[in-house]
Amino acid sequence: MRTARVIWANDLRSVVRDRTVGGLLVVPLVFLVLLRAGVPLLERRWPAVGGHHAELLGLFCVIVGMFPAFMTALLMVDERDQGLVSAFRVLPLSPARFLGARLAMAGLLGLLYPLLLLSASGLGGYGAGRALVLAALCAAGGAAALLVAVSLAKNKIECLTAFKALFVLAAIGVTGALGDFSGVNALPGVLPAYWVFGAFAAGGTGAFLSASAVAALLYGIVVGIFHRLFRRNFF
C-alpha cells in the first residue's frame, strides 16, 4: 500500500505540473455545470431534450470515467519514452504491482467523477446502489482504455490518437440507450459502452442488471486480452 501511495503522489505531482493534462482534473466540474445549468436551458428551447436525460448523463459519465485513465496512460508512455521503465526492472516492484497501482488510481478517480455527475447533476433518479454500479462501469471503461492505449501506442502522439478513437467508440455506444437490441442498432452491441448506456436507460431492475452484467463481461474480456499485450509490449 505504501508503494501505491508513493506512485500516486508522484503521478499527481506530474499531472499538476503539466497544465495541459492537469486541466483535465477540473473538466468534470465544467461538465457538472453544463448538465445542471445547460440542459434546462436546452429544454426550454428544444423540449424534446427532456426525454434524453439518460443518454446525456451517460455520455458525460462515460467520458469523465476515461479522463483519469487518459492522464495515467500519457504518464506511462512518457516514462517509457524517457527510458524509465528499464529502471523499474531493478526495483523491488513487480509489473503486476506497478500496473495495479496505476489502475487503482485511474479507477478510483474514474469512479468518483461519474458519481459526482450522477449525484449532483439533477438528471435522472438513480438510487445509491444503481449509481455506484453505473460509476463502476464507467471506471472499468477507463481501466480498459488505459490498457488498450498503452499496449498499442509507441509514443505520446499515438497514445493521444488511440484515446481519440476510444472516446469516439465510447460515444457510439450511446445507441444502446436509443432502441432495442435488434437490426442496425445491434451492430454496436460488441462495444462495452453500448451496454453501459443501456444500463443508464434501463427502467426495470432486471434490464439494468442484465445490461450491467454484459458490459462488465465485455470489459473483462478487453482487459484480459490487452493485459497480456501490456506485459509484453510495455516492460
Image: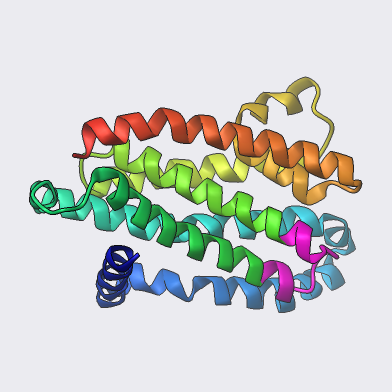
Give coordinates of residue 177: x percent, y percent: 78, 43
- Can you say whether 123 is above or below 195 in the image? below
Q: Quadrant of the N terminus?
A: bottom left
- In the image shown, does 163 or 139 lie closer to the viewer? 139
In the image, 190: left or right of 97? Answer: right
Give me the residue at 80% from left, 60% from top.
53
Count of numbered tags:
0
In the image, 8: left or right of 143? Answer: left
- Can you say whether 213 is above or below 72 in the image? above
Residue 124 on the magenta segment: yes
Give me the residue at 79% from left, 42% from top.
209
Q: Quadrant of the C terminus?
A: top left
Give me the residue at 76% from left, 70% from top.
39
Residue stretch in magenta:
117-131
- Can you say whether 233 is above or below 156 in the image? above
Give me the residue at 23% from left, 46% from top.
94
In the image, 206: left or right of 158? Answer: right
- Can you say whether 69 is above or below 178 in the image? below
Q: How is the image coloured?
A: rainbow
Give coordinates of residue 200: x percent, y percent: 76, 51
- In the image shown, does 189 or 79 lie closer to the viewer? 79
Give coordinates of residue 190: x percent, y percent: 62, 27
Answer yes or no: is residue 175 visible: no
In the image, 181: left or right of 227? Answer: right
Residue 196 on the magenta segment: no
Give coordinates of residue 48: x percent, y percent: 88, 58
Answer yes or no: is residue 205 visible: yes
